[in-house]
Structures are given as structure tokens and as C-alpha cells.
Amino acid sequence: MRASKAVHDRVDCDAQLRLEQVKLQKLKILFGDWWQHYTVPYELRWTLWAERSACPYCGGSLGSRPADTEEEDGEALLGHIDHMDPLSRGGEDSIRNAVYVCAKCNLAKGNRLFVDWLARLEPPHRETARFVYLEKHGTQPEAFVPGERQPRLTLGRLELQFDESVLKKLFKRPIVKGPPRTSGS
């Protein structure tokens, strides 16, 4: 029975990832090269969850699927989306600033700056976490300048309801010319 559930979960995950890939193509039409700055983590929660097989902060489990999915259970609640640069300190509410981590680490990190959090991690996990930050941000965590609190954006983009072909006709070029301006950037 357990093997059957694992197969079902894998099929469900693959289906969700395919749906998010379609959504990702639409986001690229809307935002061009800057899509990672404007895509809120909740739009691609399965993609974020699938990026890592374990918590980058401690190596712990992330559960059998992302939290906040339709069927929450104890396994799903093991993982949280962490904003590496906290929203309360000026970090973006974007996929480039988000990573799935275990609940214990997310709650322990709280709104600490990433550089302060790194100092608390064990050396192998500190290296992994720094690599993840650099991979997503393209800069070292020491480059982050704290700023004003940023809002959490939880509503989906209405444009994503349209077919990709319709979006290409409606938006001949991206609707932005660069990353969002925050007091922390």
C-alpha cells in the first residue's frame, strides 16, 4: 500500500510540475528576463519544493509534497517557504528569494538577515545555504542591504488565465524594464 501511495505522489508531483512549467512560460512572456523578480513563490510552490531533496539549512526532510497544497498532512507540513532575505527587512517576495526549508529551520531563522543565519548553521549546511543563496540571487548574501518591509503577495496574476498564444498577442514585449525597486536594492 505504501509503495502505491509513493507512486501516486510522484505522478501528482510530475503533473503539478508540468502545470507550473506552463505558468512559467507565461510569466516569461509578461516579465521577460526579470521574471524571477516578479514571480511570487506561491505561483511555483511545486517547482520550489522540487529544487531540493532536503532542507538546505540542516539536511532534514521537506515532506512528501509542498505545504499549502490541497491535501495537507503531517508530511506536507514539514516544509516551509523561507524568504532568504526576510520581507520584514526589505527582501523581495519572489521566487529568486525563496527556498523550501524544514519548518524547524524556518521558524528558527525568523526574520534574521541571511548572513546572521549562516553563522548559526553547521559548516556543511552553511556552505550549502550560501551556495543556494548565490545560485538564486547571483550575489553573496553580504551584498543585501536591509530596507523597508515588503508586502507578501498572495494573489495570483490574472494574466496567467490566458493561453500562451493570447499573452504573446497582448504583450508584445515584457511589461517591466528591470527588477522592482525596493529600499533594500
Image (tube, helix red, strand yellow):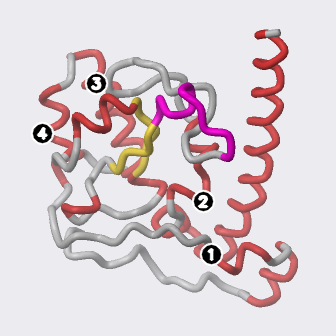
Q: Whole-percent x and y of residue 26?
A: 72, 69
Mark 4: amino acid = Asp
Determine which quarter of the picture holds residue 15.
top right
Contact between labelled residues 1 and 2, with CB atoms less than 8 Å apart? yes
Q: Which mark is residue 127?
A: 3
Judging by the rendered image, the residue that carries numbered circle 4 is: 116
Question: What's drawn in magenta, residue-wise?
Answer: 70-79
Judging by the rendered image, the residue that carries numbered circle 2 is: 43
Left-right relation of 126 to 51: left
Q: What residue is drawn where x is 28% and y is 24%?
A: 127
Q: Earlier in the sequence, mark 2 or mark 4?
A: 2
Q: Residues within 10 Å of mark 1 (few under 14, many from 20)?
A: few
Q: Whole-percent x and y of residue 135?
A: 42, 42
Q: Earlier in the sequence, mark 4 or mark 3?
A: 4
72 in the magenta segment: yes
Q: What residue is drawn where x is 15% and y is 62%?
A: 146
